[in-house]
Image: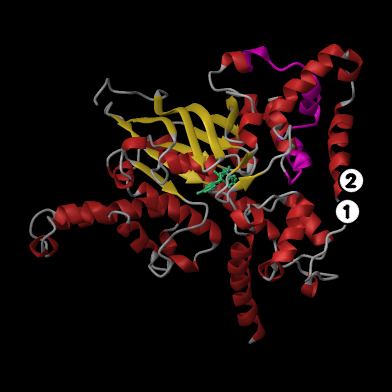
């Protein structure tokens, strides 16, 4: 399909009425949003909101249950991604992606990783013959071109000095940038990045921001980003789409989204109770006050086609006889509760004038009462070994508050989590009200990998 040539700021990606069901679980429900060409669009939301599922639908890993995903390329060609085979999404529609867990060829050098990414182009230039590989025909020129492109992205990612080192030996932040450089070697029109800032320190986050801004400013590649790190999201995104329980709850520029009471409410509702983090990241506690106020009618349900597209209660409690069960307590959608709060505030003006900090405080104190309940774990420690706890935040699914709670109950190390028995998992899930998430997010597998990784430097140190 060829339509008019599309320019900057026109939609490169249109997601329309997307739904994805896993048995009885509705992971995405009637989701619509757009990403504009030349912009950085961020997809954010609490754990389990459905962000990765959206990526998997866009990049062909899942075939959506319903809906359309249209990519319009620079020359105006339109691709219906939900109908394309996975390899064509990359090859023809020019969509590239990175994953939550780094997937480099760790034994190959940095440069080799960038060359392997151009394998398709090189094979085509070889004519798939030995003569081609020996340099007859266009192969040599294509090989030189590939090396030049690899060098270009090495430089952009600030990795030139590490070109000949094995990718697996790079620090974590460098590996993240190498993944992005590798994806850019396929010259994508749309680059999908799944939590690129996960596990980065502030300096590495800054280097990532610089690289992404550079890609945006100099290549014309549009970026779709899933990210939990609000400092990255708010600093580099042009447009933010917020999901909660597979539904869109907010959509706009960062300044609108960060002060949208529904977004604050959704983050207030996450199990990690990252209330204070969110408040710090969005500015101050003023925004909390809005939880007691009237929502902005310009951004209410009437103004957006898929905004809170149906009764949330229809989609948040699901059980599948085949196994996948997701139990969410009634009213778990905090975004939905904002509307209820605002209605209550309208009928009781005195309550609406309640100080903001009190509102936030009451949310916190309700949750705090939970933490007084006991938690029985078989391998708790009284103090961290060597006085140094592991950074449990590296386990996807553990946020700062749950890290604190686990520490309070004597869990400080990856190997402790790796050794949890069924009874421990059940106890922790009941305590954190996680309903099967530890298994779904594979905390044990993640903890085993992290424990193995952190054991290595310890061994080297002990030989000194
Ligand atoms: N293949 C699958 N089979 C069954 N359920 C799935 C599958 N993939 C995702 N889910 C479920 O769909 C829901 C959304 O998951 P998804 O990974 O998309 O969320 P997310 O917003 O990316 O979360 P996070 O921020 O923790 O990565 C979750 O309840 C998850 O358990």
Label 1: state its secondary structure. Answer: loop
x 59%, y 71%: residue: 453
179 sits left or right of 296 in the view: left
x 8%, y 55%: residue: 137
9 sits left or right of 360 in the view: left
x 76%, y 65%: residue: 412
Specify few, some or many for label 2: CA neighbours under 10 Å numbering under 14, 14-19, or 20 or more.
Answer: few
Specify few, some or many for label 1: CA neighbours under 10 Å numbering under 14, 14-19, or 20 or more.
Answer: few
Tell me where residue 208 appears, x and y as whole percent.
53, 48
On screen, 328 above or below 80? below
Between the C-alphas of marks 2 and 1, the distance is: 8 Å
Highlighted magenta segment, given as a residue range: 271-300
**Residue 411 image-quadrant placement:** bottom right
Label the magenta part by its dominant secondary structure.
helix
**Residue 301 image-quadrant placement:** top right
Tell me where residue 440 appears, x and y as whole percent.
60, 54
On screen, 283 above or below 120? above
Residue occupied by mark 1: 373
Residue 406 visible in the shown view: yes
């Amino acid at each position: 399909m060829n339509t008019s040539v599309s320019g900057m700021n026109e939609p490169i990606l249109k997601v329309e009425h997307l739904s994805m069901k896993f048995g009885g679980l509705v992971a995405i429900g009637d989701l619509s949003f757009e990403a504009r060409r030349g912009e950085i669009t961020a997809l954010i939301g609490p754990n389990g909101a459905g962000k990765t599922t959206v990526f998997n639908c866009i990049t062909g890993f899942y075939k959506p249950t319903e809906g359309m995903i249209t990519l319009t390329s620079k020359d105006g060609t339109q691709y219906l991604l939900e109908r394309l085979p996975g390899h064509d999404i990359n090859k023809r529609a020019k969509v590239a992606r990175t994953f939550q867990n780094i997937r480099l060829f760790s034994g190959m050098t940095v440069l080799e990783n960038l060359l392997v990414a151009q394998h398709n182009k090189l094979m085509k230039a070889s004519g798939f013959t030995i003569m081609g590989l020996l340099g007859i025909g266009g192969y040599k020129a294509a090989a030189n071109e590939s090396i030049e492109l690899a060098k270009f992205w090495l430089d952009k990612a600030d990795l030139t000095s590490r070109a000949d080192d094995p990718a697996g030996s790079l620090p974590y932040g460098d590996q993240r940038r190498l993944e992005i450089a590798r994806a850019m070697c396929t010259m994508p029109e749309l680059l999908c990045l799944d939590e690129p800032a996960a596990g980065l320190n502030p300096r590495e986050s800054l280097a990532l921001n610089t690289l992404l801004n550079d890609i945006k400013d100099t290549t014309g590649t549009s970026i779709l980003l899933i990210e939990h790190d609000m400092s990255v999201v708010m600093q580099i995104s042009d447009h933010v789409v917020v999901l909660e329980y597979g539904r869109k709850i907010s959509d706009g520029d960062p300044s609108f989204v960060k002060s949208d009471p529904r977004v604050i409410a959704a983050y207030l509702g996450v199990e990690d109770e990252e209330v204070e983090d969110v408040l710090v990241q969005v500015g101050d506690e003023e925004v909390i006050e809005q939880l007691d106020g009237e929502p902005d009618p310009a951004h209410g349900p009437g103004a957006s086609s898929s905004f809170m597209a149906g009764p949330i209660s229809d989609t948040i409690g699901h059980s599948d006889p085949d196994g996948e069960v997701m139990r969410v307590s009634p009213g778990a959608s905090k975004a939905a509760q904002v509307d209820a709060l605002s209605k209550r505030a309208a009928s009781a003006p005195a309550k609406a004038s309640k100080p903001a900090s009190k509102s936030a405080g009451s949310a916190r104190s309700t949750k705090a009462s939970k933490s007084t309940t006991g938690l029985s774990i078989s391998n708790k420690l009284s103090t961290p070994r060597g006085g140094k706890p592991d950074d449990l935040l590296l386990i996807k699914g553990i946020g700062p508050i749950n890290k604190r709670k686990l520490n309070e109950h004597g869990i400080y190390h990856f190997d402790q989590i790796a050794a949890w028995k069924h009874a421990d998992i059940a106890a922790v899930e009941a305590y954190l009200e996680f309903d099967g998430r530890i298994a779904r997010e594979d905390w044990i597998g993640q903890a085993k990998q992290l424990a193995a990784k952190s054991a290595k430097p310890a061994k080297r140190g002990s030989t000194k």
